[in-house]
């Protein structure tokens, strides 16, 4: 959907000025995204602009680029206006000069001029689409040109702190996402296919002028963390896990997970596991405050989960010792949360470690902890997810058991009796204040 | 959605054998597609396998390739099995050796072996994603390696004729697509947003375990041929144009267009234009038979449209002369139809001219006619669309009028009184018998 969304032009100007002020000299290249082909060149996936381009330039159209020139304190937009031939196919388009005005950009040049404004000293961001590799090779003249770490750090420090305007958008995206979850929960009943619930969610998203920010996880097999298969039939007694969020025209998104019983009521065991996850969620909500290292939040929540699992009888011993030994990773294999904003994993395209870690707080290499995307201290204005879960993965039980792992903390006998339990996750989005 | 769909393994074997028999020697490389990143590497668009890979190999998973070795009459599948780490994220996966069996392929090798089986004589198909360019450069060792024309011709001649099994799938896809259109027409009413109707369509598609084969055109501005903006509100008196079709798990798709009045009843003028388009549609249906050049079908329909437009008063003079002069392209700027199958524009990734034209029947370079994707003689077993339309495009009126074009055939005065008429199209899918 072509977007008409723009913040006031002053917003883009001041965002760029903040970035410019972080550098003494040089040029910054921001590549807009291209259309992505599905099965032939002109059959496209829904267009998604690069988030950094959206943040500093705001124009939600393919085949554009921008240069922010530190020395001249000037931004140049590169792109081509629509020809009359294209008008037949795509309708009348706003001239680029006019779009430039919306982003407080005075200078607009044809795309072919871009190569004359890029040299091997131009700073650029990491590639995350094959098109970026091809473009950069053509522009920089080298396959091995390296993205700029100072540029990454400068942008992360800026985009990590959400402005009032951004928070309004994020609040809207999260509210619509919450409504989408309610619609799914209301519609779910035994006999339905998972894909029918995906349809309910799609309709809700479309009814609100939005689309999915990421492929829905809509599954009775929540133990598969990134499950995008929707072919199962819901049965009485099943637990449905739905991880879904919408993206607004502005690009800002929501990321929520709910787990609910198809039969409207959990079994006793399901309720016990759900409440353990909920206790972890409440702990995360309580202690996610400016100044705390998110790594610490993660491990505090792990201890709550372990304590609950000890009560349930799937774990044993002391919760804190179990977490120190890593035994909780049998059940909680991913990280507690991540930054959210224009991307559902905000700025993950820069490399997770630049967004979630610092030189002091570095990423673990241990199973489980290494999947924690965010470890560094929280700051006022961060927007994060908290998403604890408990997952029973038969293959992982077999692996850990055969390796003789965590025998002091895992009750393999009772756990094996519940190999088909599934998975439960609760996820909400939080503004740190 | 990960597909479990396979034809009987014999189907893939015999399809490959037919292809092998067309060559004396050599190797054919078939590249499967990768996941496509949206705004960061791990946020993916819904996976779509390459259609030729689906046709000969059938496996609907990313990061695979196949070599069909003519000399050894052997097919090798290249891919990597899922590691235990991946099982946590994606669930247990069928081993590739087992998937190979489903396609009657005995030899499965790790992906890294592929480069040892490709050399500069290996035949391959045209690139349509940036990833293809990067892969081929790595495999062939050259940026300029050229796809194989004999391979294109061999595959087109095979895929152009749909088998019984394919027709069953296509029939299913078209039936579900037709149901989707009925659901949209039933739901439409004044006051709704176009995007709400997209939601109705998405839900219908999902309810039937399918997804859109291409982005929906759902618009009160049907005169914009590829309109993907959904933000308008439907008003009484508006004409809605919906061009949409679903894709099955098997990859086969439907492609239908309906134009209908929001107020349930057309105005007199709308009815007159609609009936003209319908007469064109009926003509196309009548004469689309084995042996006729589709170019001829196209121009016969153009004459019907011109005759209707003369009656309406937007054109004047003799219909046949008008079409010979190209004056109908004021109203009908695209081609009458195209091949359909695993792709909504079947095999368009090979280059339209190889699919729709021959050495004898070549593509026109004239405005309008140059947009005709299909010109060659129809054969039994072809599956095509017929999609005549009449579109009033203000910018095109101004262009032609200012250039003094078609003054003998266009009644600019009455046409300009109806500059905001919009557009009407009717499209159905046909098996040529």
Image: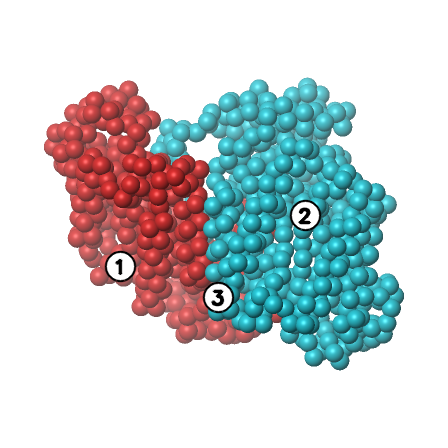
Chain colours: A red, B cyan
Residue at disc 3, secondary structure: loop
In the rendered image, residue B170, in percent from the top left (x then y), is placed at 63, 40
Q: How many other residues sit within 10 Å of disc 2, few (<14), some (14-19) or many (≥20)?
A: many
Q: Give me the disc on residue B192.
A: 3
Residue at left offset 50%, top offset 35%:
B3
Q: Do tags 1 and 3 sit on the same chain?
A: no
Q: Is residue B400 visible?
A: no
Identify the residue position indicated by label 2 in the image.
B429
Residue at disc 2, secondary structure: strand
Q: Is residue B302 visible?
A: yes
Residue at disc 1, secondary structure: strand
In the rendered image, residue A195, in percent from the top left (x then y), is placed at 44, 43
N-terminal-most mark, 3 or 2:
3
In the rendered image, residue B160, in percent from the top left (x then y), is placed at 72, 39
Q: How many other residues sit within 10 Å of disc 1, few (<14), some (14-19) or many (≥20)?
A: many
Q: Chain of mark 2?
A: B
Identify the residue position indicated by label 1 in the image.
A431
* Tag nearer the camera, 2 or 1: 2
The alpha-carbon separation of the residues under discs 2 and 1 comes to 51 Å
| Quadrant where the C terminus of chain A is found in the figure | bottom left
């Amino acid at each position: 959907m072509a977007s008409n969304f723009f913040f006031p032009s002053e917003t883009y100007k001041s965002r760029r000025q903040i970035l410019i002020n972080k550098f003494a000299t040089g040029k910054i290249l921001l590549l807009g995204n291209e259309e992505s082909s599905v099965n032939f060149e002109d059959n496209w996936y829904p267009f998604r602009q690069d988030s950094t381009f959206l943040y500093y330039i705001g124009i939600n159209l393919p085949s554009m680029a921008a240069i922010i020139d530190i020395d001249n304190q000037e931004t140049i937009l590169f792109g081509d206006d629509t020809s009359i031939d294209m008008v037949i196919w795509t309708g009348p388009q706003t001239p680029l000069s006019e779009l430039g005005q919306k982003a407080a950009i005075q200078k607009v040049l044809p795309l072919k001029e871009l190569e004359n404004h890029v040299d091997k000293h131009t700073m650029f961001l990491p590639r995350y689409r094959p098109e970026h590799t091809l473009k950069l090779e053509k522009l920089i003249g080298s396959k091995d040109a390296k993205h700029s770490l100072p540029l990454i750090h400068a942008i992360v420090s800026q985009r990590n702190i959400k402005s009032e305007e951004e928070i309004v958008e994020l609040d809207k995206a999260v509210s619509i996402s919450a409504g989408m979850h309610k619609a799914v929960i209301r519609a779910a009943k035994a006999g339905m296919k998972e894909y029918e619930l995906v349809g309910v969610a799609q309709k809700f998203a479309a009814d609100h002028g939005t689309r999915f920010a990421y492929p829905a996880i809509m599954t009775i097999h929540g133990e598969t963390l990134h499950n995008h298969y929707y072919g199962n039939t819901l049965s009485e007694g099943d637990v449905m896990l739905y991880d879904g969020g919408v993206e607004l025209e502005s690009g800002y998104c929501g990321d929520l997970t709910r787990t609910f019983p198809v039969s409207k009521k959990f079994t006793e065991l399901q309720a016990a596991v759900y409440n353990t996850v909920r206790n972890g969620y409440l702990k995360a909500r309580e202690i996610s405050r400016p100044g705390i290292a998110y790594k610490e939040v993660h491990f505090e929540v792990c201890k709550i989960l372990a304590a609950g699992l000890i009560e349930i009888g799937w774990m044993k011993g002391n919760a804190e010792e179990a977490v120190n030994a890593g035994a909780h990773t049998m059940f909680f294999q991913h990280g507690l949360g991540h930054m959210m904003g224009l991307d559902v994993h905000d700025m993950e395209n820069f490399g997770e470690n630049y967004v979630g870690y610092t030189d002091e707080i570095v990423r673990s290499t241990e199973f489980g902890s290494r999947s924690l995307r965010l470890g560094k201290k929280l700051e006022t204005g961060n927007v994060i997810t908290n998403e604890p879960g408990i997952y029973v993965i038969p293959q992982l039980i077999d692996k850990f058991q055969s390796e003789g792992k965590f025998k002091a903390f895992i009750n393999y006998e009772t756990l094996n009796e519940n190999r088909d339990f599934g998975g439960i996750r609760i996820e909400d989005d939080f503004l740190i204040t």
